[in-house]
Image (tube, grey):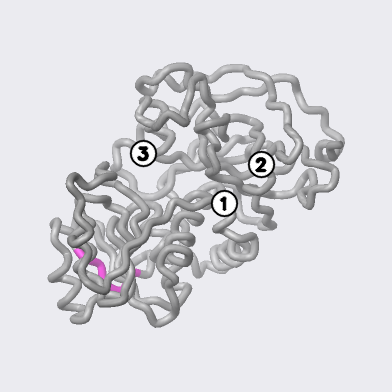
Amino acid sequence: MSQPTAAGDAVPATMRAVVVTRPGGLDALEIKDVPVPVRKSGWVRIRVKAFGVNESEVSTRKGESDAEVTYPRIPGIEGVGIVDEADENSSLKPGQQVATMMGGMGRSYDGAYAQYVTVPAAQVIPFETTLPWEVVGALPEMFQTAYGSLTTGLDLRAGHTLLIRGGTSTVGLSAATIAKDLGATVLSTTRSAERAGELRAAGVDHPLVDNGTLADQVRELMPDGVDAALELVGCSALADTLRTVRRRGTVCFTGALAGQWTIPDFSPFMIPGGVRLTSYAGEAADLPADVLAHQLQTIAEGRLKVPVAKVYHGLEQVRDAQADLESGTTPGKHVVVLDD
């Protein structure tokens, strides 16, 4: 059985959604009236309030994703909103604030570029906050990836030194603020000296200009190497990043901003002796509710900064959001808010 919708509100039969019926340019993002999704047992229906716009959704729109993505598809790998309907025995209740992300959302099944979305209950994170939706909407995928990389991937602790390669990306900026909150010393990179101020604003101790080779710069600051490195640029930078880490230190491969996900003719001997290499892809479960609650509290107190690039209002502005994301001219997260 299902719990009734919040406040007894009747759910409409149709909703507005952004649908990609075929790969293409920005015009492939079409606003359509579609049926409100019917919730399956073990799933939760969420009334979407805001969602972040991500490179993954650009890839879906262009047809550059893997075979998991089929069309037509409502994109959106993350979202925040209010529980509309859940199983009767679920701990999730109608009216509750929740976040969700990943797990095939917006890829193998329809995502958050819509007024309603249904997702497995296991990937729903409840929270309580008075922060505005445009702030909360920036967080799920960004914080889950950053937090999971630092904890599951790198086991980062207070007193550790961390290098973030790809530091002005949304995940890089988030990782810097979280790492500082954990008590780490942070080195982080930008390809432009003019953007060093963004890194300092996120709490970075040592901004570095990445000219393709970082090992010498890092070793000047940390002669023995850093304890941990978060690789967000990709395989083209990985060999050099590995050389920045001390023996028994760890590199976590999480992203490929430069677009290269594989290394031709890879040899394990490219990994320096004693240096560990791992990866992180992660799911919603890697961002526990108590961790999200702590992060929301630190944001509310002004101790943690959310790198929001721009806020957009309504599904009509999704094309603008993707265009701005692709341009790369405004650092931070692009967030779409669905105003009532």
Can residue 44 be seen? yes
> For mark 1, what is the residue?
284
Look at label 2 and name its amino acid: Pro
Q: Nearer the viewer, mark 1 or mark 3?
A: 1
Numbered tag placed on residue 325 in the rendering: 3
Q: Residue at x 52, y 67 (%)?
A: 302
- Magenta stretch: helix, strand or loop mostly: strand
10 Å neighbourhood of mark 1: few (<14), some, or many (≥20)? many
Q: Circle 3 sits in a helix, a strand or a loop, which is it?
A: helix
- How packed mark 3 is, by other alpha carbons closer than 10 Å (few <14, some 14-19, many 20 or more), is many
Provide the residue designation for mark 2: 120
Kind of residue at badge 1: Ala
Q: Residue at x 69, y 38 (%)?
A: 46
Q: Image quarter for residue 112?
A: top right
Query: Seen in the image, is 34 located left or right of residue 320?
Result: right
Mark 2 or mark 3: which is in front?
A: 2
Disc 3 marks a residue whose amino acid type is Leu
Quadrant for the C terminus, please: top right
Q: Which corner quadrant holds the N terminus?
A: top right
Q: CA distance from mark 1 to mark 3?
A: 23 Å
Nearer to us in this view, 48 or 111? 111
Mark 2: few/some/many CA within 10 Å (<14, 14-19, 20+) = some
On the image, the x and y values in percent for residue 155 come to 44, 71
Q: Which residues are magenta?
A: 204-208
Q: Earlier in the sequence, mark 1 or mark 3?
A: 1
**Rendered location of residue 195, percent (x, y):** 25, 57
